Image: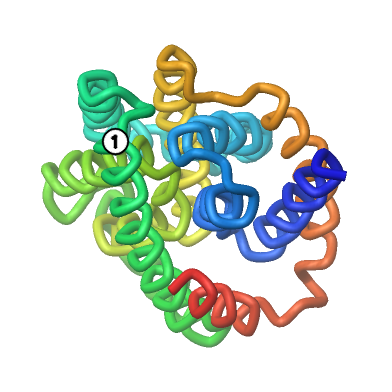
Amino acid sequence: MPDFAFILAGFAVGLIVGLTGVGGGSLMTPVLIFVFGVKPNLAVGTDLLFAAFTKLGGTLGLARQRLVPWRVVAQLCAGSIPAALLALWALRHLGPDSAAAQRLMTTTLGAALLLTAAATFYKVLVFSPERAAAEAARRRTQSADATRPRHWSLPVLLGAVIGVLVTFTSVGAGAIGVSVLLLVFPHLPLPRIIAADIAYAVPLTLVAGLGHASLGSVNWPLLGLLLAGSLPGIWLGSRLVARTPERLIRSVLSVLLA
């Protein structure tokens, strides 16, 4: 029965991710900690590799469609990967199973969930069909390089913040990442923003996840059970998305996260 419960949880989270593109780390990690009683370090480490494997498939598909702005991905990774390595060093120094590390991870998780809730609600307001159409028309008239940020330092600095959040909590590469991209790259079309968000999350979650694995903070059997549920859930959600009021789901999800 516990094994089936993990598969069911993976399916539910995968379904929400397929419907909204949000909810991987921001739902899976707190469910593992607060519903199943998994230790925070094991929940975070397992969910990081769960996210890496899940988003790798999406990145390959987007790359084949030539939607991934690799220059943007590189700028974000320039900040997020070093920050993730520093956060892993801090966890190793504290001891991932120590009371101080557990308290740090749960406190940071709370802050990350509030940020994700705010970012998810922001996406509800920004991604209305009418506003999206007007924004697309405006961006088509822009002659500036779409991959040029408002300032060269912004993607590196904000990427570093996300790298720390993701390493400590596995939360932040989804809704927060999209919101950062919308603000920093105002001329980048929405499909390429989403593609960049998915693509840069793969090396970030892989580095952070492997770092947690080196600390003994990954439950491999649990990871297999979650993937067994999430992959069918994502498949189903991606096919139901056209028939589901996405703004309603995102609104409910933002309240749930808060």
127 w.r.t. 71: above or below: below
Residue 258 in the figure: left or right of residue 89 = right
Residue 3 in the figure: left or right of residue 72 = right
Assign a secondary structure to mark 1: helix
- Residue 169, horizontal then vertical, whole percent: 39, 44
Name the residue: 48% across, 17% down.
Answer: 216
Work out whether residue 203 or residue 218 is closer to the camera in this orientation and state it: 218
Work out whether residue 157 or residue 208 is closer to the camera in this orientation and state it: 208
Residue bearing the label numbered 1: 101
Residue 164 in the figure: left or right of residue 29 = left
The 10 Å Cα crowd at callout 1, few under 14, some 14 to 19, many 20 or more, is many
* Quadrant in the picture for residue 22: bottom right
- Residue 208, horizontal then vertical, whole percent: 40, 27
Q: The N terminus lies in which quarter of the figure?
A: top right
Name the residue: 40% across, 19% down.
Answer: 211
- Asked whether residue 99 appears in the rendered view, the answer is yes
Name the residue: 39% across, 51% down.
Answer: 172
- Residue 104, horizontal then vertical, whole percent: 27, 44
Name the residue: 53% across, 87% down.
Answer: 130
Residue 223 in the figure: left or right of residue 232 = left
- Asked whether residue 187 appears in the rendered view, the answer is no
174 w.r.t. 69: above or below: below
- Residue 33, horizontal then vertical, whole percent: 53, 49
Question: Which residue is the extreme one toward the front?
Answer: 99
Disc 1 marks a residue whose amino acid type is Ala
